Image (spheres, rainbow, N blue to C red):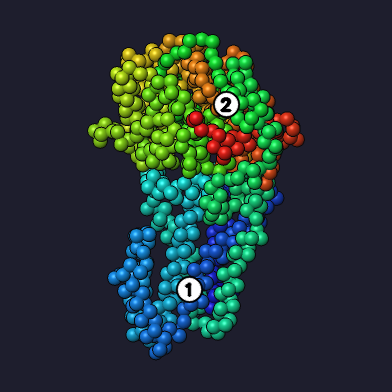
Amino acid sequence: MFNKLVSPHKFAPVFIVAMFVIIISFLTRMILLVVFGKGMSLSLLFTGSFFIGLLYDIIVGFFVAIPFVLQVSFTSELLYKKAAKYITISVLTALLCLLLFTNFFPRDYNKDLYKAVEIFVAVRWGIFLFLCTQSEDFRYKWRGFILQFWIFLTVFLLLFNAVSEIVFWQEFSGRYNFIAVDYLIYTNEVIGNIRESYNVPLIIISVLLASIIFFLPVRKTIAASVRSCYSRVKRGLLACCLLALPFILAMVIHPAWVSYSSNNYANELAGNGMYQFVQAYENHELDFFKFYKTIPDSTAFNIVKQELANPNAVFRHPGDSSIERLITSNQPERKMNVVLISVESLSGSFLKAFGNTQNLTPYLDSLADHSLFFTNMYASGTRTVRGLEALSLSIPPMPGESIIKRPRNENLFSLGTILKNKGYITQFIYGGYAYFDNMHYFFTNNGYDVIDRTALKPSEIHHSNIWGVADEDLFDLSLRTMDDNFSKGKPFFSQIMTVSNHRPYTYPDGRIDIPSSSQSREGGVKYTDYSIGDFMRKAASRPWFANTIFVIVADHCARSAGSTDLPVTGYHIPLIIYSSTFTAERKVDVLTGQIDIPPTILGLLHFTYYSKFFGQDVLDSIAPKEKAFISTYQSLGLIINDKVVIQTPVKKVRMFIPDFKTGNVTKVPPIDSLAQKAISFYQVAVWMVKHKKYGAN
């Protein structure tokens, strides 16, 4: 087929590469529909996904082909003519000498890049000298071989990327997004996770065989194309057109077209992984005031203040662009220790109380019966940094990247800062290396001391994978740290972040009845539950135990997939608050979001303090205005009055009535008052961070 289409064309390799991109993208889209479409047929809706997806595939195809446009355009026998040959050798020799023996090009700017350029120029110099000694026929064969090699490598990379997209979708229920951009930055953890989670040699061999199958039918066409004779003018005009084409298409075809449907699966299918990756990289932060519907700032602040109003909260600057208020308690302060355990990917659906019958969390199930057990609790986002952001800053999730990952995120108003000012030792304890996701920098600069796996000796680690040490080792480190805190005679706040319930789901054998070799999510959940139980039993023997409040909450759900942008079932998580001395045993059915946890903790301590938090103490005797914020990197949701208001770019505001058991939704016309509340909270949060009004001082 390819031979008939492009055999006489010198630019055949360009069109072949573009067609490979389009075909592989189509097959990837089909696999994603069949495997993850939950039985959805190729209806008119999903036909739209394939049509719109084709437009993005064409853009990507011709962008990928650009190197081959350049290679075809600038390869010429003219360079091997007598005069041109000596000029080319002289230029390459002079350039190589400048690189090797002078500092004409500053090598300190990027030593690795400089070294790569040196090697490239040296290799090109050697190849040119070699080809100068060969016949014209040999040079044509050489060019054909090189062109075939690069196209074969391109096919291999395209197919490998297709596998990566499928794996990414399995983990994150969508195309490449901000998470993929982060993973490009943290390659050590990501590559390690892939090695530990998948049979990489088998994947590579399979992709290699598929590449051969794709490549063989076109190899003769590619080799023959180098002998096609085009005039320099014709070749130049074609090259200019082919180079301009993808840029023109990128300007005409808008990134927002991918959101053509109210069905999130259809939108994700319509995307192209490489195209979405570039969009995510270029738009790491989304300008709320540019992409989202807004109202006057004064109106937004007034609405937020009304929602946060409470007889125990007196605003310091009424009428001003500030939500700072004095929270007072009429009871003596409790200088109790606080241990906040943030559990990786602990969906509510794993607990028996929410219908699970697999007995995955026997300890947490039993602890819930003797604690404050929050049954209507929702995570702010779908990534660990979103959970940590909510638990430390009590602020709604903003579009784009989490504050934890953003620049200039120092000295913010945090739970750690409040407790440090109250005389507490404040710590963030993590089982991995805290440089990941910028956690070390963020917590260090916002009122916490950071302790990570570097504090462990090799003999203290029973098991580790690329994400960190086993949870039991993390908790043993935490116990030693808390014992040391107690010896200093000061109350402490220790926030612990677990890692074992994360792919590849490996842990020490012999702890639970699911072997580590199964590498199953169920095993990860059950092992983390075992580790928390072991920690709590050991803590019970410590002298500081009776004076400690334990808060156990998920950072986010295991999965957040659904037919809508923000399925509520993908954000439902457990929250357990336990103290051996004062906690009443009861279920708390109040609608609660992660940002409500910091003020609720401070309420249990009966603290009087100045607050900029957007969350509320949901245990306050005066009923709070119930709400919960949920989000992805661009969809901003607010659960309120049994409805979900969702804001998305291009200034869209939609409202749904969700089924809190299935996650399905029924679209309803927006209620203006609820829409304004949703807009106001996000707008005020973005405004305060943007104008540096969410500082600790």
Quadrant where the N terminus is found in the figure: bottom right
Helix or strand or loop: what does disc 1 sit on?
Answer: helix
> Which of the two residues, 78 or 614, is positioned nearer the viewer here?
614
* Front of the two marks 1 and 2: 2
Q: Position of residue 145 (x, y in %)?
A: 42, 74
Relative to residue 39, is residue 328 depicted above or below?
A: above
Q: Position of residue 459 (x, y in %)?
A: 24, 33
Q: Which mark is residue 324?
A: 2
In which quarter of the view is residue 39 placed?
Answer: top right
> Which of the two residues, 672 or 571, is positioned nearer the viewer here?
672
* Upstream in sequence: badge 1 or badge 2: 1
Residue shown at 50%/54% (left/top)?
162
Q: How many numbered discs?
A: 2
Asked whether residue 484 is in view, the answer is yes
Q: Position of residue 169 (x, y in %)?
A: 52, 46
Three-letter amino acid code at the position of disc 2: Glu
Residue under label 1: 71
In the rendered image, the residue lying farthest to the bottom is 82
Residue shown at 53%/47% (left/top)?
284
- Lateral position of residue 499 relative to residue 655, left or right: left
Residue shown at 64%/43% (left/top)?
289
Residues at marks 1 and 2, CA–CA distance in whole angstroms: 61 Å
Three-letter amino acid code at the position of disc 1: Gln
Residue shown at 37%/33% (left/top)?
450
Relative to residue 468, is residue 117 depicted above or below?
A: below
Marks 1 and 2 in Cβ contact (< 8 Å): no
